[in-house]
């Protein structure tokens, strides 16, 4: 189904669909009309000769320089080239395509003053599958100037489009790059939480856990949405499991990473939902400076439109929400790794050390997976450090540009953290499957049984004298694709 852009109701799901799966995109007729009205205001302001930032003047510390009318178009062309200061490797193609979509949707809102033809050019190239190289580093989150200049240069070079007054600034002074990366990261993190629920439920069966930790009284007495949803999912996956039989639990109370699993996952769910809601607002907001004020239809005929200088490029709410999401994700990966380590230890699991096929064996069996899990967990947790209060410098722009949200770093770290967490989840799944084979407890749950069989198709049981599974990448890819989620 074609995604219609009107600047008001674009969703994270739609961004992922277009960026990753090539979903078709089109501009809504009302968006084209809104852009034409805003452009008419731009032309009126130009004809009146008013000083307007970036339109009739320079930008940054050169805001006091008035542009010669004959130089305005060339100034906008140079503006793109002069802001190509991004550094580092190229961003993933899905992030670049997502940025194109976010940029076109921001134009569709009808307040940037660009011609509809500019938005149509972006949509056309997006539908053709084009994604120019965009370097990932160099934005402080007050408009992704460097990456957006790379994107603009690629779009202009490919299409031959000639930018007019205000359009060079509108291309680079946007946070579309960060917003798109946030969409990819949030969607990935939420899918990962689905997999962590599956792995956690499998841990409960592998451990012989006490399912009083899933009792409905929990959400009745602590009605957090994330906690309630997690409890429902875990109970559904464990439907028919041996754990519900009387006497199945090995302990009256399990270690906290087992007993509090619903609470840990529920906290992360609520944080991610909060971040997604903030992101939805940002997706459908103007991030541009300046902003065109178009007269409403019921105003006097002589009412003139205006262009006002604003700070809409400050996306502090999104930067902070992404920080919050990473902070809440850290205990999830820590607990997942801790459960895997406890399953590998005989005093906790009641099984052979390292989950060896034969008790008392000198072989390490799966023991060393604990080291890998701990190392990756520590690395993932370091990415949870908040960055939204960082300030790069107050010197740039004669001290005017003295604020930084660091939202691009916040989004990128969430994506990187999610990738590392997927590896811990893969280790957790392999360890749980080995423990289940050794315990031979009885029937698994409806959902956990499917997950167990899927893992075993990729990594067989480690028998006596077998070496450690050499390659967990197939399981990592399984997790990354979301093939173990309850829906899948």
Image (cartoon, rainbow, N blue to C red):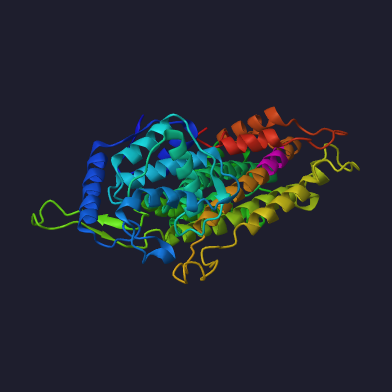
Residue 257 visible in the current orientation: yes
Q: Relative to 283, is 450 above or below?
A: above
Question: Residue 359 versus residue 86: which sits nearer the camera?
Answer: 86
Q: Where does the magenta region start and end?
A: 426-433
Looking at the image, residue 370 sits to the left or right of residue 46; the answer is right
Q: Residue at x 48, y 61 (%)?
A: 320
| Residue 304 x/y as whole percent | 16, 57
Look at 32% across and 56% down and name the residue there: 68
Q: Is residue 148 left or right of residue 258?
A: left
> Residue 285: in sight, yes or no?
no
Above or below, 407 against 9 in this view is below
Asked whether residue 429 is drawn in magenta, I would say yes
Q: In terms of secondary structure, what is the magenta stretch mainly? A: helix
Q: Residue at x 86, y 34 (%)?
A: 464
Residue 484's spot in the image, x, y percent? 58, 35
Q: Please tell me which residue lies in front, 368 or 211.
A: 368
Q: Is residue 371 left or right of residue 327?
A: right
**Image check: 202 left or right of 126?**
right
In the rendered structure, does residue 80 fall within the stretch colored magenta?
Answer: no
Closer to the camera in the image, 38 or 269:
38
Q: Dividing the picture into quarters, in which one does residue 351 lie?
A: top right
Q: Find residue 404 and report its horizontal and vertical position in percent.
A: 49, 64
Residue 343 position within the rendered picture, expressed as x and y whole percent measured from the top left: 73, 47
């Amino acid at each position: 189904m074609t995604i219609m852009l009107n600047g008001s109701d674009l969703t994270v799901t739609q961004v992922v669909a277009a960026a990753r799966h090539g979903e078709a995109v089109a501009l809504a007729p009302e968006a084209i009309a809104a852009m034409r009205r805003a452009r008419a205001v731009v032309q009126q302001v130009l004809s009146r000769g008013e000083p307007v930032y970036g339109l009739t003047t320079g930008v940054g510390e050169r805001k006091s320089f008035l542009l010669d009318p004959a130089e305005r178009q060339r100034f906008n062309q140079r503006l793109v080239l002069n802001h190509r200061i991004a550094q580092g490797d190229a961003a993933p193609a899905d992030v670049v395509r997502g940025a194109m979509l976010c940029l076109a949707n921001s134009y569709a809102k009808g307040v940037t003053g660009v011609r509809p033809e500019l938005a149509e050019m972006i949509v056309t190239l997006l539908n053709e599958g084009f994604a120019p190289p965009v370097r990932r580093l160099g934005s402080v989150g007050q408009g992704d100037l460097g990456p957006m200049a790379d994107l603009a240069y690629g779009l202009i070079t490919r299409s031959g489009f000639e930018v007019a007054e205000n359009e060079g600034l509108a291309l680079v002074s946007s946070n579309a790059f960060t917003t798109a990366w946030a969409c990819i990261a949030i969607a990935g993190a939420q899918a990962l939480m689905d997999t962590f629920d599956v792995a956690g439920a499998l841990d409960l069966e592998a451990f012989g856990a006490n399912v009083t930790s899933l009792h409905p009284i929990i959400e009745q007495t602590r009605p957090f949405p994330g906690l309630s949803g997690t409890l429902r999912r875990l109970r559904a996956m464990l439907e028919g499991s041996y754990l519900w039989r009387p006497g199945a639990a090995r302990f009256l109370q399990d270690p906290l990473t087992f007993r509090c699993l619903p609470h840990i996952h529920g906290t992360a769910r609520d944080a991610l939902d909060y971040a997604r809601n903030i992101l939805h607002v940002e997706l459908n907001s103007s991030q541009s400076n300046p902003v065109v004020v178009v007269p409403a239809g019921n105003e006097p005929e002589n009412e003139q439109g205006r262009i006002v200088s604003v700070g809409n490029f400050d996306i502090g709410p999104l930067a902070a929400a992404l920080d919050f999401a990473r902070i809440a994700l850290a205990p999830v990966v820590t607990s997942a790794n801790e459960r895997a380590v406890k399953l590998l230890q005989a005093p906790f699991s009641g099984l052979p050390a390292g989950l060896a096929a034969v008790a008392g064996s000198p072989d390490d069996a799966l023991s060393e997976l604990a080291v890998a899990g701990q190392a990756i967990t520590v690395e993932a947790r370091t990415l949870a450090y908040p960055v939204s209060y960082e300030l790069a410098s107050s010197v740039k722009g004669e001290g005017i540009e003295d604020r930084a949200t660091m939202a691009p770093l916040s989004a990128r770290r969430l994506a990187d953290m999610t990738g590392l967490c997927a590896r811990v989840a893969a280790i957790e799944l392999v360890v749980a499957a080995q423990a289940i084979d050794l315990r031979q407890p009885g029937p698994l749950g409806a959902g956990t049984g499917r997950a167990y069989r899927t893992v075993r198709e990729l990594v067989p049981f480690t028998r006596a004298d077998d070496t450690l599974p050499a390659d967990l990448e197939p399981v990592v890819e399984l997790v990354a694709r979301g093939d173990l989620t309850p829906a899948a």
